[in-house]
Image: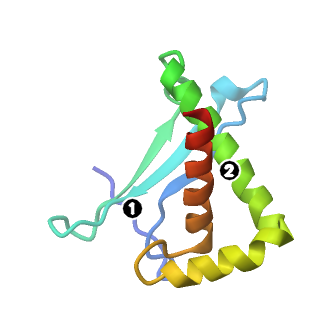
């Protein structure tokens, strides 16, 4: 098995290093280079791997289920609501104050806190 060693400035690489341009006429000829890094107490330091994947291994083999469609719609709606709330000046002061009040025991970031608020609002309205 081959071993991947990175330069001293790079400790780990994880994720897609190159992607396939699916809109290209030559998409079937392209390869995606995917690097993974796993660090666990039971593994050694050499747990980095590189994979080459073609277009057939990237495309989905099953149709999208109705639950997935609903989850995607929920995610999109909540994401849009959070972005709108972050830009709405009438909410900024109260959201910041409420976030700071709960920060020690609750959500660590303002974005996470707003996501929770908007998710609750979405779930209540779409019950």
Q: Secondary structure at mark 1?
A: loop
Taking depth in this image into account, of 23 and 67 the one nearest to the observer is 67
Residue 12 at x, y = what percent? 44, 69
Number of residue marks: 2
Left or right of 74, for residue 48: left
On residue 79, the disc is 2
- Name which of mark 1 and mark 2 comes first in the sequence: 1
Q: Residue furthest left?
A: 42
Q: Indicate the quadrant where residue 97 lies.
A: bottom right
Q: Indicate the quadrant where residue 117 lies.
A: bottom right
Taking depth in this image into account, of 78 and 124 the one nearest to the observer is 124
Taking depth in this image into account, of 33 and 81 the one nearest to the observer is 81
Tell us which disc is closer to us: 1 or 2.
2
Residue 19 at x, y = what percent? 64, 43
Residue at which label 1 appears: 4
Q: Residue at x 61, y 73 (%)?
A: 110
């Amino acid at each position: 098995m081959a071993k991947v060693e990175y330069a001293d400035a790079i400790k780990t690489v994880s994720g897609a290093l190159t992607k396939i341009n699916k809109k290209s006429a030559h998409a079937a000829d392209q390869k995606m280079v995917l690097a993974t890094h796993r660090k666990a107490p039971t593994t050694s330091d050499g747990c980095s791997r590189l994979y080459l994947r073609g277009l057939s291994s990237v495309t989905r083999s099953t149709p999208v289920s109705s639950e997935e469609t609903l989850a995607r719609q929920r995610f999109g709606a909540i994401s849009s609501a959070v972005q709108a709330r972050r830009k709405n000046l009438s909410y900024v002061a109260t959201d910041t104050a409420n976030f700071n009040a709960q920060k020690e025991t609750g959500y660590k970031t303002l974005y996470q806190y707003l996501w929770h608020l908007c998710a609750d609002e979405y779930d209540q309205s779409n019950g």
